[in-house]
C-alpha cells in the first residue's frame, strides 16, 4: 500500500490570442477580429471513498492539465482546457515545502491545487480610435506548477493495535467484510486493512495496522509509518495474545510505543483485549486477570476462532465509541 508520494503537477497553459482582420467580399478592409485564447485547465483533488491507496500517483509522478486552445479569426474564442480531477483517498493530506496545504478528510471534498493560465486576448481588444488596426495580441499565461507531497492517514472508528501474530487480522475477518491475508507467522499484514463492522444496527470502520515491535515509534519494522494511521481513529483496541508469557508487559510496551510516537495516541480511548483465549485454561486466565488488576485494568478475553465472547468485546467497544 502506497501511503506517501511526492509528485509534480502543472495546470494547463492559456491559449494565445490571435491577430486577424475581417476579410469579406464587400469589406476588404474590415476591422480586427482576432479571438481570445481559452483558459488552461485546472488541477483539482477530489476525496473519494472508492480509492484507498496512493499507488496511482506513485506509478506516474507527473500530472498535467490540458492547455487552452488559441483563438481564431472571426472573434472565435479558443476552447478551454479540460480540468484534471485527481481522486485521492479520504484522509489524504497535501503538503508543499513541509507545510500542509489541505487535509482531505471528507468524502466528496474538492480542492483546486493548481490554477490554469488565463487565455490571451485577440487583437480585437486593442483597437481604438487612434489605432484601428492593432497588429498585436496577448499570449496566454502559463498554468501553476507545483511539487507536492501526498500522505495518507486512514480514517477509522477503531484501530487494532498489537504485536505481530496477535490475531488482529483474524478478528477483523470474523467481525467484518474485510478479507485480510492471514497466516500463523509474524508480519503477515504488511499494509493497513479496513473493515466495516455492524454493532447494534450501526456501522463502524475498523483499521487493522501491521503488527508493531518494540522500537516501532522510532521506525523499527516501519512502525512509524504504520502508527500514523491510528492518529485519526476514535478508539484503539489494544490486543495482547494469550500465548504471551507476560501479557501485562506486552501491554506496557505497546502503550509506550503509542506514547513515544504521539502523546495524542496514548490518550485515546483504549479497550484492552486478550486474544486467542481458547488456548489457555481457567487458572491461566485468573493469573492474567490478577496481573492486570494490579494496574487497574480489566481486559476482555475473546477468541476469534471459536467466537467466544466476541459479542461482549464489541459491546464494550460500542459503549466507548457512541
Image (cartoon, rainbow, N blue to C red):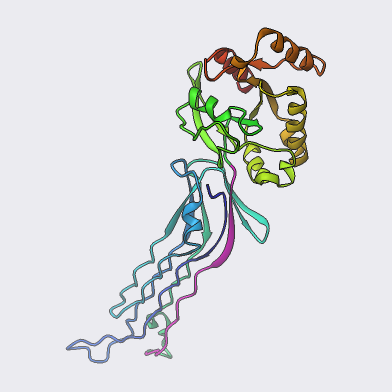
Residue that appears at 66% across and 22% down: 243
**Extreme residue in the right direction:** 294
x and y percentages locating residue 71 in the rendered image = 35, 76
x and y percentages locating residue 188 in the rendered image = 55, 37
Vertically, is 269 above or below 61?
above
Q: Quadrant of residue 137?
A: bottom left
Observer-nearest of 96 and 283: 283
Q: Please state the total of marks drawn on the protein image.
A: 0
Residue that appears at 39% across and 90% down: 135
Verify whether residue 267 appears in magenta. no
Q: Quadrant of residue 273?
A: top right
Q: Is residue 165 left or right of residue 181?
A: right
Vertically, is 14 above or below 34?
above
**Extreme residue in the top direction:** 282
The C terminus appears in which quarter of the rendering? top right
Q: What are the residue bounds of the magenta stretch?
A: 133-153
Observer-nearest of 245 and 66: 245
Vertically, is 212 above or below 171?
below
Amino acid at each position: 500500500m502506497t501511503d506517501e508520494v511526492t509528485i509534480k503537477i502543472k495546470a494547463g497553459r492559456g491559449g494565445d490570442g490571435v491577430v486577424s482582420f475581417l476579410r469579406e467580399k464587400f469589406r476588404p478592409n474590415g476591422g480586427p477580429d482576432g479571438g481570445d485564447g481559452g483558459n488552461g485547465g485546472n488541477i483539482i483533488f477530489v476525496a473519494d471513498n472508492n480509492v484507498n491507496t496512493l499507488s496511482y500517483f506513485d506509478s506516474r509522478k507527473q500530472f498535467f492539465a490540458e492547455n487552452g486552445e488559441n483563438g481564431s479569426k472571426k472573434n472565435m474564442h479558443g476552447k478551454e482546457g479540460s480540468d484534471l480531477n485527481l481522486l485521492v483517498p479520504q484522509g489524504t493530506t497535501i503538503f508543499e515545502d513541509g507545510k500542509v496545504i489541505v487535509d482531505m478528510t471528507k468524502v466528496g471534498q474538492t480542492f483546486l491545487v493548481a490554477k490554469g493560465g488565463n487565455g490571451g486576448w485577440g487583437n480585437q481588444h486593442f483597437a481604438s480610435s487612434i489605432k484601428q488596426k492593432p497588429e498585436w495580441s496577448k499570449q496566454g499565461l502559463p498554468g501553476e506548477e507545483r511539487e507536492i507531497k501526498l500522505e495518507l492517514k486512514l480514517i477509522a472508528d477503531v484501530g487494532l493495535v498489537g504485536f505481530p501474530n496477535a490475531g488482529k487480522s483474524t478478528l477483523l475477518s470474523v467481525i467484518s467484510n474485510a478479507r485480510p491475508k492471514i497466516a500463523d507467522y509474524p508480519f503477515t499484514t504488511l499494509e493497513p486493512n479496513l473493515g466495516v463492522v455492524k454493532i447494534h444496527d450501526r456501522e463502524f470502520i475498523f483499521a487493522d495496522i501491521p503488527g508493531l515491535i518494540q522500537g516501532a515509534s522510532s521506525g523499527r519494522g516501519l512502525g512509524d509509518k504504520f502508527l500514523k494511521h491510528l492518529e485519526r481513529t476514535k478508539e484503539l483496541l489494544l490486543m495482547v495474545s494469550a500465548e504471551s508469557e507476560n501479557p501485562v508487559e506486552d501491554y506496557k510496551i505497546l502503550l509506550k510505543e503509542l506514547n513515544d510516537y504521539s502523546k495524542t495516541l496514548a490518550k485515546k480511548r483504549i479497550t484492552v483485549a486478550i486474544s486467542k483465549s481458547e488456548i489457555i485454561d481457567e487458572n491461566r486466565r485468573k493469573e492474567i486477570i490478577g496481573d492486570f488488576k494490579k494496574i487497574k485494568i480489566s481486559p476482555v478475553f475473546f477468541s476469534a476462532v471459536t467466537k467466544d465472547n466476541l459479542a461482549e468485546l464489541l459491546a464494550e467497544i460500542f459503549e466507548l465509541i457512541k
